[in-house]
Amino acid sequence: MSETLSLLEALIRRESVTPNDAGCQDLLAERLIKLGFTDERLNFADTQNLWLRKGQQAPLFVFLGHTDVVPTGPLAAWDSPPFEPTIRDGKLYGRGAADMKGGIAAFITAAERFVVEYPEHKGSIAIMMTSDEEGIATHGVVKVVDVLEQRGEKIDWCLVGEPSSDQKIGDVIRVGRRGSLCAKLTVLGIQGHVAYPELAENPIHTFAPALKELTEEVWDHGNQFFPPTRLQVSNINGGTGAENIIPGQVEVQFNLRFCTELDEATIKARTQAILDKHGFKYDLQWRLSGNPFLTSQGALIDATHEAIESVCGFQTLDDTGGGTSDGRFIAPTGAQVIELGPLNASIHKVNEHIGLDELEVLSRIYQQILVNLLAY
């Protein structure tokens, strides 16, 4: 059994449902301390964060990952227990196999092999881990970055091991992500009897024209790196459940995945202008999940392209699709940030898995990236 597969199995056995780490970070630290990495815990509230670093000189290369996983869903729907790693038909099944313990195992063993082969490598290598990526992400990487910034530790290159690949390992790398802005809108009306609408004010009726306008708004046209910004309504709740009551309010939740053509302030102003035009009373609360970021060029992208071509024999595709990742907290520091990891087809699903051959290919790619950037 390979070192990468053995490590991944050990990680999957730890039931680290967010924000629980379940000992995963201890396992990683124990391995890397033996190779000269310093072990620092930067825990906040119920979130465990790990900072392992070897070397003190620039440039600083960071592998970024999260040890927490999403809940399993119905256990009966799994073909094998989700926290008992099981090999079937050349694949390893288990919660977190692809998102993202597979990526973690691959870059840990890649770093181990690299530092053994190049003990006097230039610059520094670090591993940043959190147990709060699949949750609300308020006490994880965002807090660790604050600590590093305060003491002047600057990240030059950051590779996030999130599952980016589509059909085969390395065919897609994420060089950026859209921003994510969430809104909770409460439209206020006057509750009453449906037989006496003149004595009430139906907030669903008053909001309907504004809803149409919000969903039809052309926010931007995107650019060469990002698709156009989109607004999507995720929840609408109004009424008491009775057939004969006009509701007193309606709550609407919506999200905008926005590109670099827009910013948070502009979206808020344009949204409120649309709402105000329709003249109803409302309360609007916003939550910024993350701003868009982009690494369009640089040494990290070049090294990654070269590594994938060397190991896999093909050219990768630079892409900015998908949701958000913890890379959104690293990019504002000025670091080059990309995401490269396992296939994403089974993530968050029942019977999540990773191919055994895919796991080894990914670890070799990671190692070659380190060679390209840090070997003399």
Image: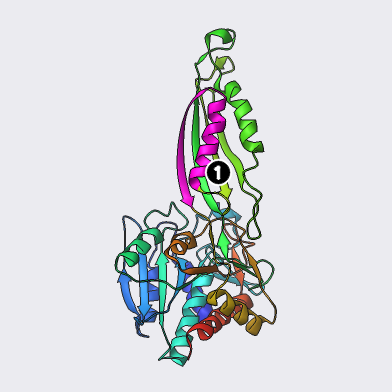
Q: Is residue 182 left or right of residue 52?
A: right
Magenta-colored span: 264-290
Q: Is residue 320 left or right of residue 281?
A: right
Q: Quadrant of residue 236?
A: top right
Residue 292: horizontal and vertical position, in percent? 53, 56
Q: Nearer the viewer, residue 280 or 362?
A: 280
Residue at x 53%, y 8% (from the top left corner): 199
The kind of residue on which mark 1 rests is Asn
| Residue 205 image point, x, y percent | 60, 21
Q: Is residue 177 shown in magenta?
A: no
Task: Based on the picture, tell me whether residue 275 belongs to the magenta stretch.
Answer: yes
In depth, the one of 176 and 136 nearer the eye is 176
Q: Can residue 15 be seen by looking at this rendering?
A: no
Please, is residue 186 above or below residue 15 in the view?
above
Q: Residues within 10 Å of mark 1 (few under 14, many from 20)?
A: some
Q: Residue at x 52, y 64 (%)?
A: 96
- The residue that appears at 49% across and 36% down in the rendered structure is 184
Q: Nearer the viewer, residue 163 or 290?
A: 290
Q: Position of residue 21 (x, y in %)?
A: 39, 63
